[in-house]
Image (cartoon, rainbow, N blue to C red):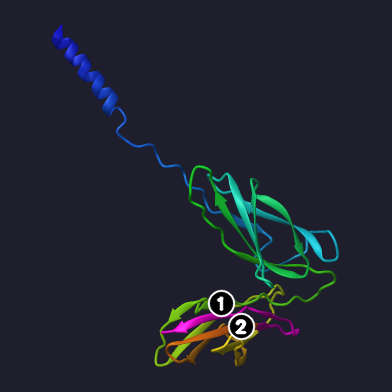
Amino acid sequence: MRKILSIITFALLLASCGGNKGEDPAPAEPGAAVLISPAQNSICTNGAVISASQSAILFNWNAAANTSSYDLIITNLLTGAATTQNFISNQAYVTLQRGTPYSWAVISKSANSTAAPRSETWRFYNAGEGATSYAPFPASIKSPVYASAVTATAGAINLSWTGSSPNAGETLTYDIYLGTTASPAVLKSNVTDSFLNNVQVVSKTTYYWKVVTKDTAGNTSDSGLYQFFVN
């Protein structure tokens, strides 16, 4: 009898201590949203007009896996001002200024995970009253990025950016400003590429630069001022 009790006790201990050797599985992380509309580099004309200066724009994105809510981030590309609003649904109406370029992105969030993947960032132009030609989107600076430190090769560096326009098939040119003060002078005008190589710089110096994008109708947009330090 004592032997039988010992076997039963051992079995109970084994069941209580070793019955669940694995840890609880980690909660599933939310997936990144896929943007639908307003479409990339589009002229948004399907908004509900509120006034001469404002319209309500419908934002749409694909529902992401394991996601309980979304942060919709909208940036005014003229002022740089960004707003973030949280939504449970994968669509939302937002009131915006007409005749203004914007960018937008979506962050997926879950109450069960700290992960917060971000979608791509798309740009669009919120159509204005009676406008037939829209200014190009401000150039996106690629290199050197803001407040970066760069190493010159033979006393020179390369500048690069990307440009786009809501007007399909439009030819863009760029004026490049570069200098050691916050009011840089024009370095080169009417650049047709999205880069400028072999720019002469001096070591241990902070530089300021920007790109002004121009279209064939005479419209312009400003990338905003960037700075970098040459090692």
Residue 223 drawn in magenta: yes
Give the residue type that dot 2 points to.
Answer: Val
> Which numbered disc, 2 or 1, marks the residue that appears first in the sequence?
1
Q: Label 2 to label 1, Cα distance in Å?
A: 8 Å
Give the residue type that dot 1 points to.
Answer: Ile
**Closest to the observer: 217 or 6?**
6
**Residue 3: image x %, image y %?**
14, 11
57 sits to left or right of 64:
right
With respect to residue 220, does 62 lie above or below?
Answer: above
Disc 2 + disc 1, Cβ < 8 Å? yes
**Residue 40: image x %, image y %?**
65, 65
The residue depicted at 54 percent of the width and 54 percent of the height is 32
| Residue 141, quarter of picture | bottom right
Residue receiving disc 1? 141
Residue 172 visible in the current orientation: no
Which contiguous range is marked in magenta?
A: 213-231
Could you tell me which quadrant the C terminus lies in? Answer: bottom left
Could you tell me which quadrant the N terminus lies in? Answer: top left
Residue 222 visible in the current orientation: yes
